[in-house]
Image (spheres, rainbow, N blue to C red):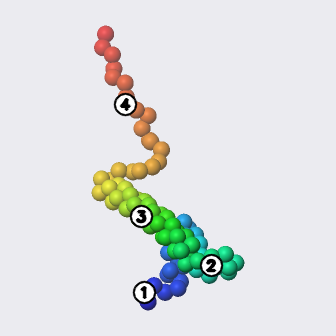
Amino acid sequence: MGLSDETLLNYLNAHPELRSRVETMLLVIADEKGELQEADAVEMQLIEQMRRMGQESLQAWATGQAVKAADCFGQESGIRRAGKKNSSGTAPLGRSA
């Protein structure tokens, strides 16, 4: 096994959309209500949940990459990403008569 239970829970809690998908898959497997009598029905539900989990996982990864890239760019360029401007603009040029 790779991750400890605590680490796995931390990852799942950091990505609630994936946690919800895993919970749904586990409930399908448990079938506590006895609603799923045919393997085909279980298979279809699990395939749909896995497809959605794949999409959500890819979205979570892309979001993380965008945040990392923005942080890296901000550090390299020395640009502040947020905050109030201190400048009131360009000083007016004097007029000559």
> Which residue, given by chain and number where applicable, does mark 1 sit on?
2
Q: Looking at the image, do the residues carrying marks 3 and 1 touch, with CB atoms under 8 Å apart?
A: no
Above-or-below relation of 79 to 35: above
Disc 4: CA contacts within 10 A as few (<14), some (14-19) or many (>=20): few
Q: Residue furthest top?
A: 97
Q: Residue at x 37, y 24 (%)?
A: 92
Disc 3: CA contacts within 10 A as few (<14), some (14-19) or many (>=20): few
Give how far across and how far down residue 6 sits, in percent. Answer: 53, 83
> Which residue, given by chain and number where applicable, does mark 2 sit on?
37
Q: Could you tell which of marks 4 and 1 lies nearer the N-terminus?
A: 1
Kind of residue at badge 1: Gly
Under tag 4, what secondary structure?
Answer: loop
Under tag 2, what secondary structure?
Answer: loop
> Which residue, given by chain and number where applicable, does mark 4 sit on?
90
Single out the mark in the foreground, 3 or 1.
Answer: 3
Disc 1: CA contacts within 10 A as few (<14), some (14-19) or many (>=20): few
Single out the mark in the foreground, 4 or 3.
Answer: 3
> Which residue, given by chain and number where applicable, does mark 3 sit on?
58
Q: Quadrant of the N terminus?
A: bottom left
Q: Residue at x 70, y 78 (%)?
A: 33
Residue 44 vs residue 81, the one in the foreground: 44
| Alpha-carbon span between mark 4 and mark 1 | 58 Å
Give how far across and how far down residue 24 sits, in percent. Answer: 59, 72
Q: Give the left or right position of residue 24, taking residue 3 as reference.
A: right
Under tag 3, what secondary structure?
Answer: helix
Give how far across and how far down residue 88 sits, in percent. Answer: 44, 34
Kind of residue at badge 3: Leu
Above-or-below relation of 19 to 73: below
Q: Could you tell which of marks 4 and 2 lies nearer the N-terminus?
A: 2
Residue 52 at least partly seen: yes
Q: Could you tell which of marks 3 and 2 lies nearer the N-terminus?
A: 2
Under tag 1, what secondary structure?
Answer: loop
